[in-house]
Image (tube, grey):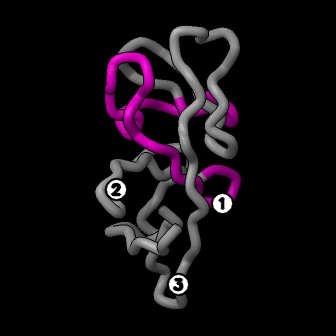
Amino acid sequence: MALQKLNVKKSELKEDSPVGADAGGKRLALVLHKGSVYAIYAVCTHEGCDLSEGSMDGDEIVCGCHSGAYNIASGKADENTNWVHDTPVYKVTEGPDGALSAEI
């Protein structure tokens, strides 16, 4: 895994509002949740919709297309949305200037 700089600073994120970012050729959805930043692969496993255009429900990011839900910390698909499968998550670090990076 390599550390990839993201085009987003933590200060630009709003609590529980997903934002899209690209890192190492992957599309990510970043979420500031309870003070921590999470990164999840942004391509829904159902039909490829962008999770960064979804919403949050508790600890889950919910796809805006067909409501598939994933835990933002583990990438585990919610058992009640059995049309989606687990998806990767990535560790996020914040640099001294507030810039975010993800281990891809």
Q: Earlier in the sequence, mark 2 or mark 3?
A: 2
Q: How far apart are the alpha carbons under marks 2 and 3?
A: 16 Å
- Frontmost residue, 88 versus 8: 88
The total of numbered circles placed on residues is: 3
Q: Residue at x 47, y 88 (%)?
A: 97
Furthest residue in direction bottom, as rendered: 96
Q: Where does the image place residue 34, in percent across and percent down from the top left?
A: 70, 53
Query: Residue at the spot x=42%, y=30% of the render?
Result: 54
Structural crowding at the residue carrying mark 1, measured as other residues with C-alpha within 10 Å and reported as few (<14), some (14–19) or many (≥20): few
Which of the pair 21/31 is nearer the observer?
21
Residue under the point 66% across and 20% down: 78
Q: Position of residue 91 (x, y in %)?
A: 60, 62
Q: Position of residue 55 (x, y in %)?
A: 48, 31
| Residue extent of the magenta highlight | 33-61
Say whether disc 3 or disc 1 marks the residue closer to the N-terminus.
1
Q: Residue at x 34, y 48 (%)?
A: 27
Q: Is residue 85 magenta?
A: no
Q: Would residue 44 be counted in the magenta stretch?
A: yes
Pointers 2 and 3 in contact (C-beta within 8 Å):
no
The amino acid type, in three-letter code, at marker 1 is Ser
For the residue marked with disc 2, what is the amino acid? Ala
Residue 36: image tag: 1
**Quarter of the image where one finds residue 32:** bottom right
Is label 1 or label 2 in front?
A: 2
Q: Which residue in the structure is indicated by mark 2?
A: 21
Neighbor class of circle 3 (other Cα within 10 Å; few <14, some 14-19, many 20+) is few
Q: Amino acid at mark 3?
A: Gly
Residue 72's place in the image compared with 33, above or below, is: above
**Element carrying mark 2:** strand
The residue beneath circle 3 is 95
* Mark sitting earlier along the chain (1/2): 2
The circle drawn on residue 99 is none
